[in-house]
Amino acid sequence: MSGDAATKVGFLVGADTTDTTPAAEATGPGGRHRGREPRAVRTPGRLGRGPAGSGGLGSWAPRGAYVLFAVALLAFPRLVGTPTDARQWAEWLCYAIVAVGLDIAWGYGGMLALGQGLFFGLGAYAMAMHLSLEQVPDGSLPSFMSLYSDNTELPLIWRPFQSFWITVIAAVAVPAVVAMLLGLLVFKRRIRGPYFALLTQATAVIFALVLIGNLKLTAGFNGLTGFSTIFGRNKYAPETNSWLYDLAAVALLVVLGVAMIVVRSRFGKLLQATRDSEDRVRFLGYDPAVVKTIGFVIAAAMAGAAGAIAAPVFGIVSPGQFDYAPSILMICWVAVGGRGKLGGAVLGALLVNWTRVTVSDARPDDWQYLQGALFVVILAFAPGGFAGMISSGWQRATAKVRPRPSGHALELEEVPA
Amino acid sequence: MTPVLELRNVGVSFDGFRALDGVDLTVQKGELRFLIGPNGAGKTTLIDCVTGLTKPSEGEIRFEGKVIGNLKEHRRVKLGIGRSFQTPTVFETLSVIDNLDLAEAFRRPMGSLFRRRRNVSSGVQETLERIGLATVAERPAGSLSHGQKQWLEVGMLLVQRPRLLLLDEPVAGMSPSERQQTGELLVELAGEHTVVVVEHDMAFLRSFASTVTVLHEGKVLSEGSVAEVQADPIVREVYLGRSRDQRSGAVVAAGEET
């Protein structure tokens, strides 16, 4: 419907409804709220917790937790981290960013996106292309190209990545646009559940294949590497590791802040509503395809941003890092940490990766088994993940006789283990 | 005057089964219309056709004179058609207020939804009081009783401020006093709004219906006031089947059996 028609209908409805006169004014003659809240009613105290709806302690606890987490995150390497550790942690923080985005798509939106590696990879390749060009004089080819191709000048697709800012924008915008096209294509056709999961997984596989197949442009299977300087910094200097850690930490905090705003907004509630009953949402006058696409785009943009930071942290960007296996691991992080809780996603990414490195250092052969077991046990016995366990423990401890929200985690599509 | 709802020769087939067959139906503004009929008569299918859940294989549906056959469900809601379902579907993880707020906010541009709700709009507040859920406004909807969920569902319909309300068995599972309240609410709504109700409960029908349309095997069998329809020999035949009991109580029994 055109905006004009929408306006007209809104007007008719507003004018037609006399039994809710003050409310009609909220719709106004324009039929649109133009972003402003309808006239508010100061709710009398009997609502219990004031007019802010989710006001009271409920709205302050997450903010307090956020501030504590921010302080801890930034203070942590200064207290315990050695420089090599810092790089390791920077990598995990990038994973946490991916996990936060995935939690919006999967935990809040019910979209089991098994191909986040695609978006993570698009961001990583964008930055890796920029870093490859940083190693050579302006206008000359990245070193692998003179080996694999007979190009004499920089291919068109590489040119924008000479600019740092275009690279940064592309690392977020390209995944977002790809997710938007994919989302609209899939959700408008009402494809969901396992079909959506398989489809996204296929995109990650195709992405890896395209990268491998275009040796002359992407260095194929070997990937882009050899970044001895990172934005003018010496790759091997210990300060660079700390700097990368801080960069990843700040990015995680920004992404987490954005995610908190998103999930607590009306849109966040709408996304949850769409997860729980897509058909009912349709009869509330929303197009679930649009709602889900927006959620999916947010997840993709976050994964792209994480990839851009992960590229210098990894020091190498190759197709194997982004195909189906890593994409499924990303789901594991969120599931283990506790989907539907942003803190759970961060916790899961950090915890699983910390355990992976710790265990595979001590017993290199056993990690795969442990990882599988961890995932199965969590899904079987604590579908809410660690965050779910913590919050139900907290609820029991504070012993509030508040009815617990029913565990939505159980109602959605099953996750292939 | 243009009727609010007009169905012309509407037919629906599911794999050869004729769920609706040449249905004509006209509902004028302000009417409180009841749709009755035995199981499988096509009552819910008819509502599904109007709201877009089912695409009719033939015929034409007009809402306020506008052909709506090709519009998606949410577009029809934006036009002013609201519906409820046989089993109340509320968003259990969201609070009662958030359920109502989302139901009201659909006319806002998508971009403005990224802001947090800071207060309760007057429409939501009035509805909360009207449906008697003001004291549980902050509770997750999943913790409500069945009856309360039904009221919440009605409330979500009301804050949408539709001009045509389609209710599918709104009093199923309600206590007698809740039925009375719902009936009074429907009568109050009719006039301003146009209301179409699918209902099995004959006592409820007799207390509140003005006009009744009887469906049978996908066709309109009879239409008129409660008394007219009850006196119609064909309706009695269909509804009572084998037993030709003259007492109207038997109609109730037949209705509740389904």
Image: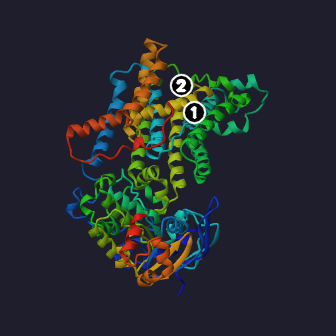
Mark 1 or 2, nearer chain start: 1
User: Which residue sits at x=65%, y=22%?
Assistant: A222
Check if mark 1 and mark 2 are on a common chain. Answer: yes
User: Which residue sits at x=33%, y=55%?
Assistant: B141
Judge left or right: residue A403 versus residue A311: left
User: Which residue sits at x=44%, y=28%?
Assistant: A376
Q: Nearer the viewer, residue A174 or B36?
A: B36
Q: Which mark is residue A141?
A: none
For the residues marked 1 and 2, what is the alpha-carbon distance in whole angstroms?
Answer: 10 Å
Q: Nearer the viewer, residue A127 or A40?
A: A40
Q: Which mark is residue A124?
A: 1
Q: Secondary structure at mark 1?
A: helix
Is residue A329 shown to the viewer in this render?
Answer: yes
Q: Is residue B195 above or below residue A326?
A: below
Where is the N terminus of chain A found, in terms of image quarters?
bottom right
Q: Position of residue A76 (x, y in %)?
A: 34, 27
Judge left or right: residue B170 versus residue B7: left
Using the image, name the chain to which the residue with label 1 belongs.
A
Is residue A167 shown to the viewer in this render?
Answer: no
Q: Is residue A341 above or below residue B87?
A: above
Q: Are marks 1 and 2 in contact (CB under 8 Å)?
A: yes
Q: Position of residue A130 (x, y in %)?
A: 61, 33
User: Which amino acid, by three-letter code, is at mark 1?
Assistant: Ala
Using the image, name the chain to which the residue with label 2 belongs.
A
Q: Secondary structure at mark 2?
A: helix
Q: Which mark is residue A314?
A: 2
User: Which amino acid, by three-letter code, is at mark 2?
Assistant: Phe
* Label total for image: 2
Q: Nearer the viewer, residue A369 or A70?
A: A369
Judge left or right: residue A184 versus residue A280: right
Judge left or right: residue A187 versus residue A376: right
User: Which residue sits at x=56%, y=28%?
Assistant: A325
